[in-house]
Amino acid sequence: MELAGWVTVGTAAVVGGFTVVGHLFDQVPALAQKMITAIRSVRAVRDEVRGSRE
């Protein structure tokens, strides 16, 4: 493969990598909100179990 071919492949790989990383970072707020909801649910169940034992 010529140098121009390798440059094209390298550029495509870098752009693709940035696209994937950017997409993953866009998902962080949604995932964080889901984790907050899950933690609150687990705490509510834990509190309910503790309350029923007493």
Image (spheres, helix red, strand yellow):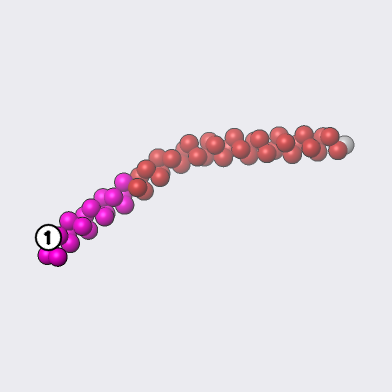
Residue at 74% in and 39% down = 46
Quarter the N terminus occupies: bottom left
Quarter the C terminus occupies: top right
Count all numbered tags in the image, as a single digit.
1
Chief secondary structure of the magenta span?
A: helix
Residue at 84% in and 34% down = 52
Residue at 35% in and 47% down = 20
The residue segment tinted magenta is 1-19
Q: Give the percent coordinates (x, y) of residue 30.
A: 48, 36
Which residue matches tag 1? 4
Q: Give the percent coordinates (x, y) of residue 40.
A: 64, 36
Residue at 12% in and 65% down = 2
Nearest to the observer: residue 31 or residue 6: 6
Secondary element under disc 1, as helix, strand or loop, is: helix
Q: Is residue 14 magenta?
A: yes
Nearest to the observer: residue 47 or residue 1: 1
18 sits left or right of 48 in the view: left
